Structure formats: C-alpha cells, structure tokens
Amino acid sequence: MSIIRHPEWAEKGRMAVDWASAHMPAIGEILKKHRETSPLSGVKVGGSLHVTKETGVLVKALKELGADVALAASNPITTQDEVAAHLSDVGIHVYAFRGETRGEYLTFIAEIVDFEPDIVIDDGGDTHVYLHEERQDLLQSIVGGTEETTTGITRLRALSEAGKLAYPIMAVNNAKTKRIFDNRYGTGQSTIEGILRATSLLLGGKVFVICGFGYVGRGIAERARGMGSKVVVTEVNSLRALEAHIRGFSVMPLEEAAKIGDIFVTATGQTDVIRKEHFGLMKDGAILANSGHFDVEISKEDLEALALKKREGVREFVDEYVLSDDRRLYLLGEGRLINLVAAEGHPPEVMMSSFSNQILSVIYLIENDGGLDPKVYDIPKEIDSEVADFVLKGWRIAKDVLTDKQKRYEKKWR
Ligand SMILES: NC(=O)c1ccc[n+]([C@@H]2O[C@H](COP(=O)([O-])OP(=O)(O)OC[C@H]3O[C@@H](n4cnc5c(N)ncnc54)[C@H](O)[C@@H]3O)[C@@H](O)[C@H]2O)c1
C-alpha cells in the first residue's frame, strides 16, 4: 500500500535511481559483503527521509538485505515524485508526494509508525519525536533508530537528557564519513546549485553572507568563494568565527552584514536568525535562502508582517516581498532547504558515504538487539572506517599501508 501522486512516473524514477546507484558504488560493495546472509531478513524498517533518487538507492539496498521498508518524506516539499512512484513499484510502502500539507505530512509519519517498525530511520527527528509523544505503546518494541542530520541529533540529545529517550539511536550525522562529506561538500555544492537554479543570477562579485560557519556553512562558504563571491560569515561561536577569519572570510555581526549583502544563506540549525531588524537594513533586491533543516532560520512571520505586498512565484521557487519603502526582498524555496527544494539535494557520490553509514548502522542495531542502552550513540570508529574503505574500494582508489617497521616506530616513546 502506498500514497503517492504520480504512479505513471515509475519508469522515469527507475532511471533516476539507476543513475544515482551507478555513482554510489560503495552501496554495491556493502551488498556484495552482506547479501548472502540477508542480515535484515524479517526486519521492518520505517524511514522518514527526503525522498530523492539517492534515498531510493538506500531503501532498495535495505530491501535487498531482507528488510520490509516503509518510507515517508522528512519534508513536505522535497519529494521527487518519480522516485516515489518507482519505489512503490518495487514493493516499498511509500507515503510521500511533493507539496504535502502539514496535515498530510504528519499523517504520513503516522503511517510509518502504524507500520510498527523494528528500526526507525529519521532525518530531522520528527518521526522519533512523534513516536515518543503519540505512540508510547510502541516504544518497547523498537530495536533502535538512526538519525541523519545535525538538527535531529540536537533534538534527540535533548530527549535523552530529559530521561525520555526509549531506544538506542545511532547518530549517523556524527560519523566523519558523513559530516565531513555530506554536510560540508554535499551541502556546499547543492546549496549553490539550488540558488542558481532558482535565480539564474551571477555569483561572481556578489556579497554572499553565510550565517553559521559549521560543517554546512564552511562548505557553502568555500563554494561561494570559488564562484567569485565576496563571502561574509556571521557566527556566534568564537572558535568558528576565528576559523572563518583565518580562512580569509570577512566576519561581522549580521547587523553589519545585512547592509551590504546581496545573497543571504542560513545554515545554523537555530531559529529566527534573520529577522525584522535585519530585513529593515537590507538592500533592494536582496536574496534570502536557507540550508538548515527547518524553515525557521529566516523569520517568515517578520517578513510577512513587514511586507506591504507579496508576489508568489515571480520565478519558480522565488517569492517577492515588497516593503513599505519599495525595497524588494526575495525569499527562495519558502525558506526551506534550498538545495532540496530548488535542486536535487546532495550529489549521489556524497550520499553514498552517508547512506553506507545508515545501512551499517541498521545492521549494527539488529546485531546488538538488546545489548544497547536507550541513548544517542556516535557511530563506532570501525563502522566509520569501514565506510571509508567501502567508498575507496567503490572508486578503485588504493591507499598505502604502514610497514612493520613503521608500526613498531609508532609504538616507541624514546
Ligand atoms: N541542506 C542540507 O542538505 C543539510 C545537510 C546537512 C545538515 N543540514 C542542516 O544544516 C544545519 C547546520 O548543520 P551543521 O552540521 O553545519 O551544524 P553545526 O552545528 O556544525 O553548525 C552550525 C553553526 O551555526 C552557528 N550558529 C548558531 N546560531 C547562530 C546564529 N544565530 N548566528 C550565526 N551563527 C549561528 C553555530 O555556532 C555553529 O557553528 C542543521 O540544521 C542541519 O540539520 C542541512
């Protein structure tokens, strides 16, 4: 049973997933290693993820390892309908279409929970939180869960600190082979791509303001500089502000940056980062986009309150807000993750590492059923390094190994 919008697009979806799969060879390496033993045989996996071609590769791999899989979207407007159609066609239970209302989005999360999964894969924490708040009757039967992104980990750590987390969570986001590649390089490239697809404007010479110099912000800053923008960083963390400065970016408070920026991108995981006082200072024509998980980083309430007029869809993914002094501000993708709304999200090569961590974490949870406490676990080093090996192998990249003499040298203290 699935709820999707365009079942007739299944063939297009199959080609999209095949394209991604061809660029995610590590997943094939993992399947080669585990296929014969079917480690997920009889396991129900419920997932809430952006329904993209790369996610298609992930859920098909889980199915190939024996799992029965149900999938909902982790955002109401990022689903690739053709991918949803293909996945439904190959026996995944899919509840997702692009442009879900808030109510539909929540109903589909409820469908994933009603599926009574053994393992819950989540991106942003909405499904884990729904389970803890609305379906406590199911909590004991859940073997464990995984979490894909920074914001989800923050929420689950808070749940854990409140003493309420009921099952173990593998923090996929925190694996080095996830965060360094996906958050930094994946979001770096795909955020620029989203902004370009939405606006078709030149980045060279523009003042490009990035709020937040974490993993995501660093990636966007590097890519924007590479496109010829003058990059300005705003930060609240001293070390990261310092790092941005030493990497050659201008660092200043948003009150200053607001006056000079042409393009603003938020990547903080925080709320109300760009708000009324900043909109009041911006230049006519300033462009606003977000790449953080939730659409709370740019205050849409303040923008609506300040604007005398709003024109939706002046281009696809671009809404125009006209302020009382005739200044026009442009919000991209309704303030939701621009790389997934206006572009296709991260490149498959990047999702290969992230989703290799997902697959190995699901297998780990099943293998350690009953042996883990209900807390948030970082991905074990062995899994992180195994993922790196799978990726290198998939790309046919060989590395050097230490000689015996070097290994002995490493252990000497004299
Ligand atoms: N678009 C995507 O595809 C994608 C991919 C990965 C992560 N994410 C999301 O991006 C967000 C950031 O993730 P991350 O891994 O970079 O997190 P991070 O914790 O490494 O970085 C966030 C940075 O923002 C800074 N910050 C917080 N509040 C701020 C404020 N008011 N002004 C300026 N700076 C502020 C923090 O000090 C920190 O350095 C999260 O919501 C995460 O879930 C999105």
Image (cartoon, grey):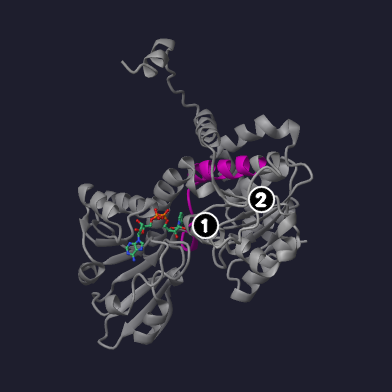
Please name the residue that numbered disc 1 is placed on.
157
Q: Is residue 341 magenta?
A: yes
Judged from the image, the quadrant occupied by ligand 1 is bottom left
Residue with the most extreme top position: 405
The answer to whether one can see residue 36 in this image is: yes
Q: Residues within 10 Å of mark 1 (few under 14, many from 20)?
A: some
Residue 23 horizontal/vertical position (percent): 53, 40
2 or 1: tag closer to the N-terminus: 2
Q: With 245 as the anchor, is 289 left or right in this view? A: right
Image quadrant where one finds the C terminus: top left
Of 275 and 154, the residue lying toward us: 154
The residue located at (43%, 70%) in the rendering is 335
Give the distance between the C-alpha atoms of the residues marked 2 and 1, in whole angstroms: 15 Å
Cβ atoms at labels 2 and 1 below 8 Å apart? no
Examine the residues drawn in magenta and state their main secondary structure: helix
Amino acid of disc 1: Arg
* Mark seen at residue 342: none
The residue located at (26%, 49%) in the rendering is 243
Task: Give residue 255's quadrant in the image.
Answer: bottom left
**Nearer mark to the viewer, of 2 and 1:** 1
Please name the residue that numbered disc 2 is placed on.
144
Residue 65 horizontal/vertical position (percent): 72, 40
Against 328, residue 405 (above or below) is: above
Amino acid of disc 2: Gly
Against 104, residue 147 (above or below) is: above
Please report the bounds of the magenta region as a residue range.
Answer: 340-363
Image quadrant where one finds the N terminus: bottom right
Q: Is mark 1 within 8 Å of ligand 1?
A: no
